[in-house]
Image (tube, rainbow, N blue to C red):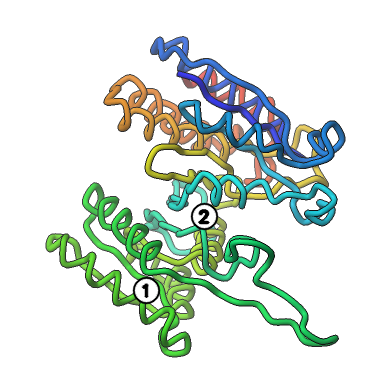
Amino acid sequence: MKILVLPGDGIGPEITESTVAVLDAVNKRFGLGIEYVYEDIGFVSLDKYGTTLRGEVLELARTLDGILLGPISHLDYPPRDKGGVNVSSAFRGDLDLYSNVRPARTRPGLGRGATGMDLVIMRECTEGFYPDRNMHSGSSEFMPVPGVVLSMRKLTEHCCERIARRSFEMAMKRRRKVTAIHKANNFIMSDGMFLEVTRTVAADFPDVELDELIIDAAAAWLVREPARFDVICATNFYGDILSDLASELSGSLGLAGSINIGDDLAAAQAQHGSAPDIAGQDKANPTSLILSAAMLLDWMGDRHGDEKLREAAGLIQTSIDAALADPQTRTSDLGGNLGTRGFTRTVLEKI
Protein backbone atom coordinates (compact mmCIF):
# COMPACT_ATOMS: atom_id res chain seq x y z
CA MET A 1 0.00 0.00 0.00
CA LYS A 2 1.94 3.03 -1.25
CA ILE A 3 1.06 6.67 -0.56
CA LEU A 4 2.60 9.57 -2.44
CA VAL A 5 3.62 12.25 0.09
CA LEU A 6 3.91 15.86 -1.15
CA PRO A 7 4.75 18.22 1.76
CA GLY A 8 4.12 21.47 -0.15
CA ASP A 9 4.73 25.06 0.95
CA GLY A 10 4.59 27.12 4.14
CA ILE A 11 3.40 25.00 7.05
CA GLY A 12 3.07 22.03 4.72
CA PRO A 13 6.26 20.19 5.77
CA GLU A 14 5.38 20.55 9.48
CA ILE A 15 1.81 19.28 9.30
CA THR A 16 2.82 16.60 6.81
CA GLU A 17 5.40 15.33 9.30
CA SER A 18 2.69 15.21 11.97
CA THR A 19 0.31 13.40 9.64
CA VAL A 20 2.88 10.80 8.63
CA ALA A 21 3.65 10.21 12.33
CA VAL A 22 -0.04 9.49 12.95
CA LEU A 23 -0.21 7.23 9.90
CA ASP A 24 2.88 5.41 11.17
CA ALA A 25 1.16 4.81 14.51
CA VAL A 26 -1.96 3.21 13.01
CA ASN A 27 0.17 1.43 10.43
CA LYS A 28 2.05 -0.27 13.25
CA ARG A 29 -1.04 -0.99 15.32
CA PHE A 30 -3.13 -2.49 12.52
CA GLY A 31 -0.38 -3.87 10.27
CA LEU A 32 -1.57 -1.90 7.25
CA GLY A 33 1.60 -2.27 5.22
CA ILE A 34 1.74 1.43 4.29
CA GLU A 35 4.83 2.70 2.51
CA TYR A 36 5.62 6.29 1.50
CA VAL A 37 7.00 7.76 -1.69
CA TYR A 38 8.14 11.39 -1.26
CA GLU A 39 8.30 13.99 -4.03
CA ASP A 40 8.80 17.76 -4.13
CA ILE A 41 6.13 20.24 -5.19
CA GLY A 42 5.72 24.00 -4.77
CA PHE A 43 8.64 26.33 -4.16
CA VAL A 44 11.06 23.50 -3.38
CA SER A 45 10.31 21.98 -6.78
CA LEU A 46 10.50 25.38 -8.46
CA ASP A 47 14.00 25.94 -7.09
CA LYS A 48 15.16 22.46 -8.09
CA TYR A 49 13.42 21.91 -11.41
CA GLY A 50 12.07 25.26 -12.58
CA THR A 51 8.43 24.29 -12.04
CA THR A 52 6.15 23.90 -9.03
CA LEU A 53 4.89 20.58 -10.42
CA ARG A 54 6.70 18.19 -12.73
CA GLY A 55 4.71 15.99 -15.05
CA GLU A 56 6.56 12.97 -13.65
CA VAL A 57 4.93 13.55 -10.26
CA LEU A 58 1.45 13.36 -11.74
CA GLU A 59 2.34 10.22 -13.65
CA LEU A 60 3.74 8.66 -10.47
CA ALA A 61 0.53 9.53 -8.62
CA ARG A 62 -1.49 7.48 -11.11
CA THR A 63 0.45 4.35 -10.18
CA LEU A 64 0.13 4.54 -6.39
CA ASP A 65 -2.69 3.79 -3.95
CA GLY A 66 -3.27 7.29 -2.58
CA ILE A 67 -1.90 10.82 -2.29
CA LEU A 68 -1.14 13.03 0.72
CA LEU A 69 -1.04 16.57 -0.65
CA GLY A 70 0.29 19.36 1.57
CA PRO A 71 -0.79 23.02 1.36
CA ILE A 72 0.50 25.17 -1.48
CA SER A 73 1.18 28.90 -1.88
CA HIS A 74 -0.25 29.26 -5.38
CA LEU A 75 -1.01 32.97 -4.94
CA ASP A 76 2.71 33.61 -4.54
CA TYR A 77 3.85 31.47 -7.49
CA PRO A 78 5.25 33.10 -10.64
CA PRO A 79 3.16 32.99 -13.83
CA ARG A 80 2.64 29.57 -15.38
CA ASP A 81 5.08 30.27 -18.21
CA LYS A 82 7.75 30.80 -15.56
CA GLY A 83 7.01 27.56 -13.73
CA GLY A 84 4.12 28.53 -11.46
CA VAL A 85 1.72 25.62 -11.93
CA ASN A 86 -1.34 25.50 -9.65
CA VAL A 87 -0.66 22.15 -7.99
CA SER A 88 -4.18 21.67 -6.58
CA SER A 89 -5.80 22.43 -9.91
CA ALA A 90 -3.42 20.11 -11.76
CA PHE A 91 -4.10 17.18 -9.44
CA ARG A 92 -7.85 17.68 -9.52
CA GLY A 93 -8.04 18.30 -13.25
CA ASP A 94 -5.34 16.06 -14.74
CA LEU A 95 -6.18 13.14 -12.45
CA ASP A 96 -9.93 13.86 -12.64
CA LEU A 97 -10.36 14.01 -8.86
CA TYR A 98 -13.73 15.65 -9.35
CA SER A 99 -15.39 15.12 -5.98
CA ASN A 100 -14.02 17.32 -3.20
CA VAL A 101 -15.52 15.91 0.02
CA ARG A 102 -15.46 18.36 2.94
CA PRO A 103 -17.14 17.36 6.21
CA ALA A 104 -17.81 19.83 9.03
CA ARG A 105 -19.24 19.23 12.48
CA THR A 106 -19.35 20.92 15.85
CA ARG A 107 -17.62 19.40 18.87
CA PRO A 108 -18.28 20.05 22.58
CA GLY A 109 -16.61 23.28 23.66
CA LEU A 110 -15.74 24.29 20.10
CA GLY A 111 -17.64 26.19 17.44
CA ARG A 112 -18.47 29.78 16.65
CA GLY A 113 -22.16 29.52 15.88
CA ALA A 114 -25.20 27.35 16.46
CA THR A 115 -24.56 23.81 17.66
CA GLY A 116 -25.68 20.61 15.98
CA MET A 117 -23.68 20.90 12.76
CA ASP A 118 -22.85 17.55 11.17
CA LEU A 119 -22.71 17.86 7.41
CA VAL A 120 -20.68 16.98 4.34
CA ILE A 121 -20.15 19.35 1.44
CA MET A 122 -19.73 17.61 -1.91
CA ARG A 123 -17.95 20.13 -4.13
CA GLU A 124 -17.40 19.54 -7.85
CA CYS A 125 -13.85 20.75 -8.44
CA THR A 126 -12.89 20.30 -12.09
CA GLU A 127 -14.86 23.17 -13.69
CA GLY A 128 -17.09 26.09 -12.68
CA PHE A 129 -15.91 29.66 -12.09
CA TYR A 130 -12.21 28.76 -11.89
CA PRO A 131 -10.45 30.09 -15.01
CA ASP A 132 -7.48 27.73 -14.79
CA ARG A 133 -9.60 24.62 -15.42
CA ASN A 134 -12.23 25.65 -17.96
CA MET A 135 -10.31 25.64 -21.23
CA HIS A 136 -8.47 23.00 -23.22
CA SER A 137 -5.67 25.54 -23.57
CA GLY A 138 -5.21 28.89 -21.89
CA SER A 139 -7.27 30.69 -19.26
CA SER A 140 -10.97 31.55 -19.32
CA GLU A 141 -10.20 34.91 -17.71
CA PHE A 142 -8.86 37.58 -20.04
CA MET A 143 -8.66 41.33 -20.69
CA PRO A 144 -9.93 42.25 -24.18
CA VAL A 145 -9.23 45.95 -23.69
CA PRO A 146 -7.60 47.89 -20.84
CA GLY A 147 -9.92 48.26 -17.85
CA VAL A 148 -12.22 45.39 -18.86
CA VAL A 149 -11.85 41.80 -17.62
CA LEU A 150 -14.02 38.88 -18.73
CA SER A 151 -14.17 35.62 -16.79
CA MET A 152 -16.19 32.67 -18.06
CA ARG A 153 -17.86 29.92 -16.08
CA LYS A 154 -18.18 26.41 -17.47
CA LEU A 155 -20.69 23.79 -16.34
CA THR A 156 -21.24 20.48 -18.09
CA GLU A 157 -24.05 18.00 -17.72
CA HIS A 158 -21.47 15.24 -17.24
CA CYS A 159 -19.76 16.88 -14.25
CA CYS A 160 -23.05 17.97 -12.70
CA GLU A 161 -24.38 14.43 -12.97
CA ARG A 162 -21.47 12.72 -11.31
CA ILE A 163 -21.17 15.12 -8.34
CA ALA A 164 -24.93 14.82 -7.82
CA ARG A 165 -24.70 11.03 -7.90
CA ARG A 166 -21.79 10.97 -5.43
CA SER A 167 -23.82 13.29 -3.17
CA PHE A 168 -26.85 11.00 -3.11
CA GLU A 169 -24.61 7.99 -2.51
CA MET A 170 -23.08 9.83 0.45
CA ALA A 171 -26.54 10.72 1.77
CA MET A 172 -27.55 7.04 1.70
CA LYS A 173 -24.79 6.42 4.27
CA ARG A 174 -25.97 9.32 6.46
CA ARG A 175 -29.32 10.98 7.19
CA ARG A 176 -30.66 10.75 3.64
CA LYS A 177 -30.98 14.38 2.68
CA VAL A 178 -29.25 16.32 -0.12
CA THR A 179 -29.35 20.10 -0.42
CA ALA A 180 -28.54 21.35 -3.92
CA ILE A 181 -26.99 24.83 -3.87
CA HIS A 182 -27.70 27.18 -6.76
CA LYS A 183 -28.35 30.72 -7.99
CA ALA A 184 -30.78 29.76 -10.74
CA ASN A 185 -32.70 33.00 -10.32
CA ASN A 186 -29.72 34.73 -11.99
CA PHE A 187 -27.65 31.98 -13.61
CA ILE A 188 -30.74 30.69 -15.34
CA MET A 189 -29.11 28.38 -17.87
CA SER A 190 -26.06 27.12 -15.95
CA ASP A 191 -27.50 26.65 -12.47
CA GLY A 192 -30.79 25.73 -14.10
CA MET A 193 -29.03 22.81 -15.80
CA PHE A 194 -27.33 21.86 -12.53
CA LEU A 195 -30.73 21.66 -10.81
CA GLU A 196 -32.33 19.75 -13.67
CA VAL A 197 -29.54 17.17 -13.65
CA THR A 198 -29.66 16.87 -9.85
CA ARG A 199 -33.41 16.25 -9.94
CA THR A 200 -32.92 13.54 -12.54
CA VAL A 201 -30.32 11.82 -10.35
CA ALA A 202 -32.61 12.20 -7.33
CA ALA A 203 -35.18 9.98 -9.04
CA ASP A 204 -32.72 7.08 -8.67
CA PHE A 205 -32.65 7.61 -4.89
CA PRO A 206 -36.31 7.69 -3.74
CA ASP A 207 -35.28 7.28 -0.08
CA VAL A 208 -33.26 10.51 -0.12
CA GLU A 209 -34.91 13.91 0.32
CA LEU A 210 -33.85 16.61 -2.15
CA ASP A 211 -33.80 20.20 -0.92
CA GLU A 212 -32.90 23.14 -3.16
CA LEU A 213 -31.47 26.34 -1.72
CA ILE A 214 -30.13 29.56 -3.21
CA ILE A 215 -26.50 30.18 -2.26
CA ASP A 216 -27.29 33.39 -0.37
CA ALA A 217 -29.86 31.67 1.81
CA ALA A 218 -27.59 28.67 2.29
CA ALA A 219 -24.88 30.87 3.83
CA ALA A 220 -27.43 32.40 6.18
CA TRP A 221 -28.87 29.03 7.21
CA LEU A 222 -25.39 27.65 7.88
CA VAL A 223 -24.99 30.33 10.52
CA ARG A 224 -28.53 30.22 11.86
CA GLU A 225 -29.46 26.53 11.78
CA PRO A 226 -26.66 24.28 10.49
CA ALA A 227 -28.48 21.17 11.73
CA ARG A 228 -30.85 21.44 8.75
CA PHE A 229 -28.06 20.23 6.45
CA ASP A 230 -26.87 16.68 5.86
CA VAL A 231 -25.16 16.50 2.46
CA ILE A 232 -24.66 19.70 0.47
CA CYS A 233 -24.17 19.29 -3.28
CA ALA A 234 -22.54 22.26 -4.97
CA THR A 235 -20.62 23.41 -7.99
CA ASN A 236 -17.01 24.45 -7.51
CA PHE A 237 -17.20 28.09 -6.40
CA TYR A 238 -20.25 27.74 -4.15
CA GLY A 239 -18.83 24.63 -2.48
CA ASP A 240 -15.48 26.28 -1.88
CA ILE A 241 -16.99 29.25 -0.07
CA LEU A 242 -19.60 27.35 1.93
CA SER A 243 -17.08 24.75 3.12
CA ASP A 244 -14.77 27.43 4.52
CA LEU A 245 -17.73 29.04 6.28
CA ALA A 246 -18.89 25.71 7.71
CA SER A 247 -15.41 24.81 8.92
CA GLU A 248 -14.87 28.14 10.62
CA LEU A 249 -18.27 27.82 12.30
CA SER A 250 -17.20 24.40 13.55
CA GLY A 251 -14.27 26.01 15.35
CA SER A 252 -11.47 26.67 12.88
CA LEU A 253 -10.32 26.02 9.34
CA GLY A 254 -7.61 24.02 11.08
CA LEU A 255 -10.24 21.36 11.82
CA ALA A 256 -11.35 20.95 8.22
CA GLY A 257 -10.53 17.59 6.71
CA SER A 258 -10.84 17.25 2.95
CA ILE A 259 -10.32 14.65 0.25
CA ASN A 260 -10.40 14.83 -3.55
CA ILE A 261 -11.87 11.65 -5.02
CA GLY A 262 -12.04 10.38 -8.58
CA ASP A 263 -13.26 7.05 -9.86
CA ASP A 264 -9.94 5.29 -9.22
CA LEU A 265 -7.74 7.59 -7.12
CA ALA A 266 -7.95 9.94 -4.14
CA ALA A 267 -5.84 12.71 -2.64
CA ALA A 268 -6.02 13.82 0.98
CA GLN A 269 -5.55 17.58 1.21
CA ALA A 270 -6.02 20.03 4.09
CA GLN A 271 -8.80 22.50 3.38
CA HIS A 272 -6.74 25.50 4.51
CA GLY A 273 -3.82 27.27 2.85
CA SER A 274 -0.09 27.24 3.48
CA ALA A 275 0.01 30.00 6.17
CA PRO A 276 3.58 31.13 5.37
CA ASP A 277 3.41 33.73 8.16
CA ILE A 278 3.63 30.99 10.80
CA ALA A 279 5.73 28.46 8.89
CA GLY A 280 8.54 26.90 10.91
CA GLN A 281 7.26 28.29 14.23
CA ASP A 282 5.54 25.17 15.62
CA LYS A 283 2.20 27.04 15.62
CA ALA A 284 0.23 25.26 12.90
CA ASN A 285 -2.74 23.08 13.76
CA PRO A 286 -2.16 19.75 11.96
CA THR A 287 -5.70 18.48 12.53
CA SER A 288 -6.99 19.22 9.03
CA LEU A 289 -4.36 17.19 7.21
CA ILE A 290 -4.48 14.39 9.78
CA LEU A 291 -8.26 14.10 9.36
CA SER A 292 -7.82 14.26 5.59
CA ALA A 293 -5.41 11.32 5.83
CA ALA A 294 -8.00 9.43 7.88
CA MET A 295 -10.52 10.06 5.10
CA LEU A 296 -7.98 8.67 2.63
CA LEU A 297 -7.59 5.49 4.70
CA ASP A 298 -11.37 5.13 4.85
CA TRP A 299 -11.62 5.52 1.07
CA MET A 300 -8.83 2.98 0.56
CA GLY A 301 -10.60 0.62 2.95
CA ASP A 302 -13.82 0.84 0.91
CA ARG A 303 -11.93 0.46 -2.36
CA HIS A 304 -9.97 -2.59 -1.27
CA GLY A 305 -12.57 -4.07 1.08
CA ASP A 306 -10.09 -3.80 3.95
CA GLU A 307 -11.77 -3.38 7.33
CA LYS A 308 -8.43 -2.68 9.03
CA LEU A 309 -8.02 0.50 6.99
CA ARG A 310 -11.48 1.64 7.98
CA GLU A 311 -10.78 0.86 11.65
CA ALA A 312 -7.53 2.83 11.47
CA ALA A 313 -9.40 5.80 10.00
CA GLY A 314 -11.95 5.62 12.81
CA LEU A 315 -9.24 5.46 15.48
CA ILE A 316 -7.54 8.58 14.08
CA GLN A 317 -10.84 10.47 14.17
CA THR A 318 -11.71 9.45 17.74
CA SER A 319 -8.16 10.24 18.89
CA ILE A 320 -8.41 13.73 17.39
CA ASP A 321 -11.76 14.20 19.13
CA ALA A 322 -10.27 13.09 22.44
CA ALA A 323 -7.37 15.52 22.09
CA LEU A 324 -9.70 18.39 21.20
CA ALA A 325 -12.06 17.64 24.08
CA ASP A 326 -9.56 19.00 26.60
CA PRO A 327 -8.94 22.78 26.30
CA GLN A 328 -5.42 22.22 27.60
CA THR A 329 -4.50 19.97 24.68
CA ARG A 330 -5.67 22.22 21.88
CA THR A 331 -3.58 24.33 19.55
CA SER A 332 -3.45 28.11 19.84
CA ASP A 333 -6.00 28.77 17.07
CA LEU A 334 -8.50 27.00 19.34
CA GLY A 335 -7.46 28.81 22.50
CA GLY A 336 -5.05 26.15 23.69
CA ASN A 337 -1.35 26.19 24.51
CA LEU A 338 0.04 23.42 22.34
CA GLY A 339 2.04 23.79 19.16
CA THR A 340 2.18 21.48 16.19
CA ARG A 341 4.51 18.94 17.79
CA GLY A 342 2.80 19.00 21.19
CA PHE A 343 -0.63 18.39 19.70
CA THR A 344 0.75 15.61 17.53
CA ARG A 345 2.24 13.91 20.60
CA THR A 346 -1.16 14.13 22.32
CA VAL A 347 -2.90 12.47 19.39
CA LEU A 348 -0.25 9.75 19.28
CA GLU A 349 -0.78 9.09 22.98
CA LYS A 350 -4.54 8.70 22.35
CA ILE A 351 -3.83 6.23 19.56
Query: Residue 119, image x and y in percent?
Result: 38, 55
At a point 54% along the width and 49% down the height, the residue shown is 92
Query: Residue 321, image x and y in percent?
Result: 46, 36
At a point 58% along the width and 49% down the height, the residue shown is 271
The foreground one among 25 and 92 is 92
Of all residues, the one furthest to the left in this rendering is 206
Instruction: Residue 136: name its quadrant.
Output: bottom right
- Quarter of the figure with the N terminus: top left
Instruction: State yes or no: discs 2 and 1 in contact (Cβ < 8 Å).
Output: no
Marks 2 and 1, how far apart in space?
Answer: 32 Å
Of all residues, the one furthest to the front in this rendering is 137
When the figure is inspected, residue 99 is found, relative to residue 215, above or below; the finding is: above
At a point 24% along the width and 47% down the height, the residue shown is 173
Three-letter code for the amino acid on which mark 2 is drawn: Gly
Q: Dot 2, how many residues are within 10 Å of its Cα: few (below 14), some (14-19), or many (20+)?
A: many
When the figure is inspected, residue 334 is found, relative to residue 185, above or below; the finding is: above
Reading the image, the residue beneath label 1 is 194
Instruction: Residue 12: name its quadrant.
Output: top right
Q: Is residue 297 visible?
A: yes
The foreground one among 227 and 145 is 145
At a point 62% along the width and 46% down the height, the residue shown is 334
Three-letter code for the amino acid on which mark 1 is drawn: Phe
- Could you say which disc has been placed on residue 111 in the image? 2
Mark 2: secondary structure: loop
Mark 1: secondary structure: helix
